């Protein structure tokens, strides 16, 4: 739960596999304990972490996508647009990593940590 729509109200974030694609689903909070219609963005990543690491006061995403053979992983950066959607901006390949099990963003957004 965090504010992904820049309205000061907490939103719900889910990472789902739909139609053979990995998507992030934001359900905007309405402020009364209910949530609005889902907003989806294709992320192609399994593990997910959110944080502000771009200096624009918006929440962004980092996802990790393992290779099928377990020989490496892609770390993908998605910048939040402030409306519940995200824009993919870059991927970094980590060779010899295997299958990551955890991901996190350090306080202040200065580093991404991936654990296997």
Image (cartoon, rainbow, N blue to C red):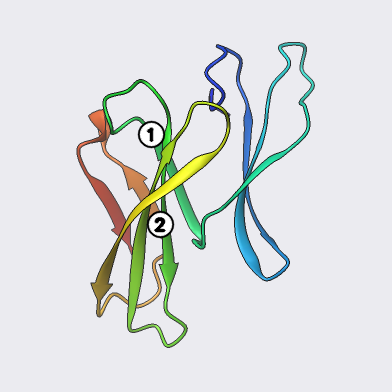
Q: Look at the image and tell me whether residue 116 can be seen.
A: no
Q: Which mark is residue 60?
A: none
Ranked by sequence position, the earlier of labels 2 and 1 is 1
- Compared to 9, does 12 lie above or below? below
Question: Which residue is label 2 attached to?
Answer: 102
How many residues crowd around disc 1 within 10 Å: few (fewer than 14), some, or many (20 or more)? many
- Distance from disc 2 to disc 1, alpha carbons, whole Å, reads 15 Å
Identify which residue, 53 or 108, lies in the foreground: 53
Q: Which quadrant holds the C terminus?
A: bottom left
Quadrant position of residue 114: bottom left
**What residue appears at the point 50 percent right and 26 percent down from the top-left corner?**
82
Left or right side of 116 for 61: right
- Compared to 4, does 113 lie above or below? below
How many residues crowd around disc 2 within 10 Å: few (fewer than 14), some, or many (20 or more)? few
Percent from the top left, x then y, of residue 61? Answer: 43, 43
Element class at badge 2: strand
- Compared to 18, does 109 lie above or below? above
How many discs mark residues in the rendered view? 2
Percent from the top left, x then y, of residue 80? Answer: 45, 35
**What residue appears at the point 63 percent right and 26 percent down from the top-left corner?**
11
Question: Which residue is label 1 attached to?
Answer: 51
Residue farthest left in this picture: 110
User: Which of pointers 2 and 1 indicates the residue nearer the eye?
Assistant: 1
């Amino acid at each position: 739960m965090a504010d992904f729509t820049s309205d000061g109200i907490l939103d719900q974030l889910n990472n789902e596999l739909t139609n053979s694609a990995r998507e992030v689903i934001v359900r905007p909070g309405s402020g009364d304990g209910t949530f609005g219609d889902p907003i989806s963005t294709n992320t192609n990543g399994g593990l997910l972490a959110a944080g502000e690491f771009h200096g624009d006061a918006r929440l962004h995403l980092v996802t990790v996508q393992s290779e099928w053979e377990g020989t490496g992983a892609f770390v993908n950066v998605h910048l939040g647009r402030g409306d519940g959607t995200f824009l993919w901006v870059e991927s970094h390949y980590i060779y010899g990593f295997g299958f990551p099990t955890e991901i996190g963003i350090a306080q202040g957004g200065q580093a991404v940590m991936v654990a296997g």
